[in-house]
Amino acid sequence: MRRRGLAVLAVAALAQAASSSSAEIPNALVVLEVLVPAQPGDVPAAAPPRFVLMEDGTVYVGGTRDLRVGKLESSEQKDLDRRIGEVRKLPLTGVMTVGPGSERRHLFVKKGRALEMVLNGDPADPPASLRALAALVTDVERFQHPSLRPYEPASFAMSAKEGTLAGGCRPWTLPEPLAESVFAPRVVPAKGHGDWPTGAIPAAVCLENDKRYVVTFRPLLPGERP
């Protein structure tokens, strides 16, 4: 019984950690986060959401570093609502295995009865009972639309931790003190950000006191708080 209790606590902690960003996007109806590194050394948690649908039909589609923004037609939004309705009929829990492997995703659906799930595995090879869920996740993860255009964020969530990366490091040239972003992300303006990498791609920083940091800048959506 003790081992089972520890497993339940671990699952709850995983779900809480995965939901830290999507729950703070105002007016978001659907959010998909893909917590899979595209390249070795990436920080998946710093990547923008892969897909966000807002109440007015605006969509944001994220990659490793940045986002694009577009707008769904009313018929397209209704079709997505229909597919979400089909998913709601499935026997869903807070943590689902949608296929083999160690991949991890986070799906948040606010419209109607709120759904929030950590999805483990590759949705390309789902169990028969979860095909509707896996197909929805796969389609929004690969979402393309003719209205999509580059999105320029007004601010970033800056995170830092002490550590080093392979290769050299660069001096800290921004006004925000790094130490204040170690325990919680700090919102910083995008203007004046310069050529620092964004999203899941980290930067190695060396300070004059010989401390070394790994720093990320996650693009924020309008009104989003980290």
Image (cartoon, rainbow, N blue to C red):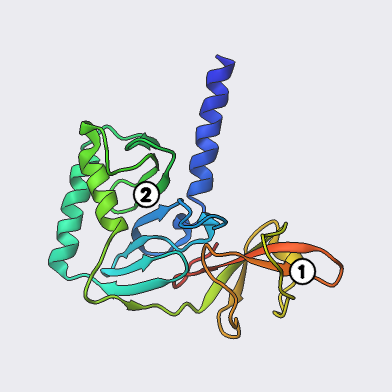
In the rendered structure, find residue 206 and report the number of the disc placed on it. 1
Rounded to the nearest whole Å, what is the CA distance between mark 1 and mark 2?
Answer: 36 Å
Q: Is residue 72 above or below residue 79?
A: below
* Among the 4 quarters of the image, the one containing residue 140: bottom left
* Residue lying furthest bottom: 192
In the rendered structure, find residue 114 and report the number of the disc placed on it. none
Residue at x 60%, y 76% (from the top left corner): 196
Q: Position of residue 24 (x, y in %)?
A: 48, 59
Q: Is residue 120 above or below residue 198?
A: above
Element at label 2: strand
Residue nearest the observer in this picture, 181 or 82? 181
Residue nearest the observer in this picture, 219 or 103? 103
Residue at x 24%, y 55% (from the top left corner): 139
Residue under pointer 2: 107
Q: Is residue 172 left or right of residue 220?
A: right
* Residue lying furthest right: 209
Q: Position of residue 206 (x, y in %)?
A: 77, 69
Q: Is residue 45 above or below residue 196?
A: above
* Type of the residue with mark 2: Leu
Q: Position of residue 120 (x, y in %)?
A: 40, 39
Q: Position of residue 119 (x, y in %)?
A: 38, 41
Marks 1 & 2, CB-CB < 8 Å contact: no
* Residue lying furthest left: 75
Which one is closest to the eye, mark 1 or mark 2? 1
Element at label 1: strand
